[in-house]
Image: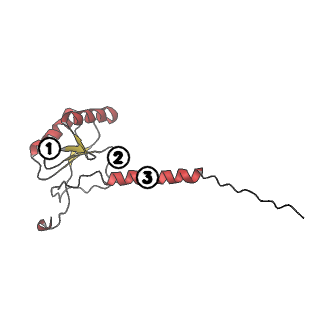
Amino acid sequence: MGKSHTEQCEIDMTPMIDVVFQLIIFFVVTMKMSQDSNMDIVLEDGQHGITLTSENMPPVTLEIEVDRRGRVSIHNATLSDSNLRDIMRARVNKYGNEFPVMIRADRRTQHEKVRKVMDICTASGVWKLSFVAIQEHKARGSK
């Protein structure tokens, strides 16, 4: 009678684990990017401005938010004036003064608070400043 011969099958799981980790990183990063905007900010109407898409916005664009109480933030991290100055100087050192800055201010924010952000940007040598507005609001009564 012949011997019973069983073979051990082994599957290398390393490539599959690498792919799973890459997918997890991708979804975490894209989820974080979509949640960075402060949803409490109500933007001003801007029917006549250009429409921004991911294709026409440079990848080094810095978006600074100013909420209605004057809180300045980047990616929902609250910044003091000195923190904002340090960030602007670091970006100027890295990219030069050619990178665009988009200020996303609540329409109820006092102009003094927005002007302070603009002054910090221009003192750092950044001159490409834009404001984010919304193209169409829902009916005024349905906020």
Residue 26: assigned label? 3
Residue 18: assigned label? none
Of residues 60 and 38, the one nearer the viewer is 38
In the displayed structure, 54 sits above or below 121; it is: below
Residue 114: assigned label? 1
Few, some or many C-alpha atoms within 10 Å of disc 1 (few <14, some 14-19, many ≥20)? many
Q: Quadrant of the C terminus?
A: bottom left
In the displayed structure, 44 sits above or below 61; it is: below
Horizontally, is 14 left or right of 52 in the view? right
Residue at image mark 2: 59
Horizontally, is 21 left or right of 136 in the view? right
Query: Is residue 37 in view from this perspective?
Result: yes
Residue located at (12% from left, 65% from top): 140
Amino acid type at image mark 2: Pro
Tell me the quarter of the picture where residue 122 sits. top left
Few, some or many C-alpha atoms within 10 Å of disc 2 (few <14, some 14-19, many ≥20)? few
Tell me the quarter of the picture where residue 111 sits. top left
Tell me the quarter of the picture where residue 55 sits. bottom left
